[in-house]
């Protein structure tokens, strides 16, 4: 079976207006996007599929479907022929056809990165494992904003610890740095 890179919700306005530390948070987001872009190029060079998930926001939402803020960041593509699965919930598998597509392509291992850590990343990693896929979560390849008293750094570190070795039957999640994810 095969491996694929799954990039979730890295859209133009993903963090717009969500964080009081704005500049610092956006700098961390940009750094994460550059790591994901380099990993996507590496995956493409290795002949691995790169799959995108895009959140369809309601009218007036920062990710309103069809708006400039809804578009996937230019640094990440998608390249010609790369599938994009649109979702309206935190779970990249819920009502999207993603699981069926992966099975049809012979993919059983996902390398996952993107946004937002406590919502779409956490939910999609758990759902992927429950749907029968192994997952490598990119330790430095997912991002969120500060939420309440927790900084984005604390939230990311927490999810890296919690999701490492999460399992459902024979399938599991593990966390690796982006530099080691496709090795």
Image (spheres, rainbow, N blue to C red):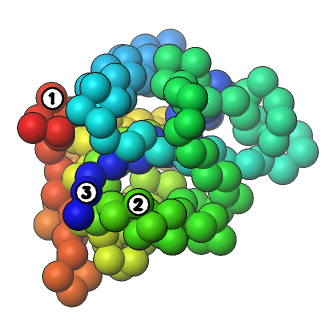
The label on residue 59 is none
The label on residue 105 is 2
Q: Residue at x 81, y 40 (%)?
A: 64
Would you call the spot at circle 2 few (<14 residues within 10 Å), some (14-19), or many (20 or more)? some
Residue 102, compared with residue 158, is above or below; it is below
Q: Secondary structure at mark 2?
A: loop
Asked whether the viewer can see residue 159, the reply is no
Q: Which residue is mark 1?
A: 179
| Front one among 59 and 84 | 84
Question: Which label sits in the foreground, 3 or 1?
Answer: 3
What is the quadrant of the N terminus in the image? bottom left
| Residue 1 placement, left or right of 77 | left
Q: How many marks?
A: 3
| Front one among 147 and 39 | 39
Q: Secondary structure at mark 3?
A: strand
Asked if labels 2 and 3 touch by Cβ distance under 8 angstroms, the answer is: yes
Q: Secondary structure at mark 1?
A: helix
Q: Which residue is mark 3?
A: 2
Percent of width and height locating residue 117: 42, 48
Q: Residue at x 72, y 34 (%)?
A: 70
Which tag, 3 or 2, sits closer to the chain's start? 3
Residue 12, compared with residue 85, is above or below; it is above
Percent of width and height locating residue 47: 30, 36
Tell me the quarter of the picture where residue 132 sits: bottom left
In space, the residues marked 3 and 1 are separated at their CA atoms by 19 Å
Percent of width and height locating residue 29: 44, 24
| Front one among 76 and 25 | 76
């Amino acid at each position: 079976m095969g491996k694929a890179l799954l990039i979730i919700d890295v859209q133009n306005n993903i963090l717009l207006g969500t964080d009081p530390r704005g500049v610092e948070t956006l700098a961390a987001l940009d750094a994460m996007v550059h790591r994901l872009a380099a990993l996507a190029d590496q995956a493409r060079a290795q002949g691995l599929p790169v799959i995108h998930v895009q959140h369809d926001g309601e009218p007036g939402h920062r990710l309103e479907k069809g708006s400039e803020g809804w578009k996937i960041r230019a640094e990440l593509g998608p390249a010609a022929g790369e599938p994009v699965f649109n979702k309206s919930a935190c779970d990249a598998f819920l009502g999207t056809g993603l699981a069926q597509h992966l099975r049809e392509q012979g993919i059983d291992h996902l390398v996952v990165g993107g946004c937002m850590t406590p919502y779409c990343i956490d939910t999609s990693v758990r759902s992927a494992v429950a749907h029968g896929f192994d997952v490598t979560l990119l330790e430095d390849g997912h991002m969120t904003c500060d939420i309440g008293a927790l900084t984005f750094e604390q939230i990311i570190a927490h999810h890296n610890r919690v999701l490492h070795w999460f399992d459902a039957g024979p399938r599991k999640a593990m966390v690796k740095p982006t530099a080691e994810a496709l090795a």
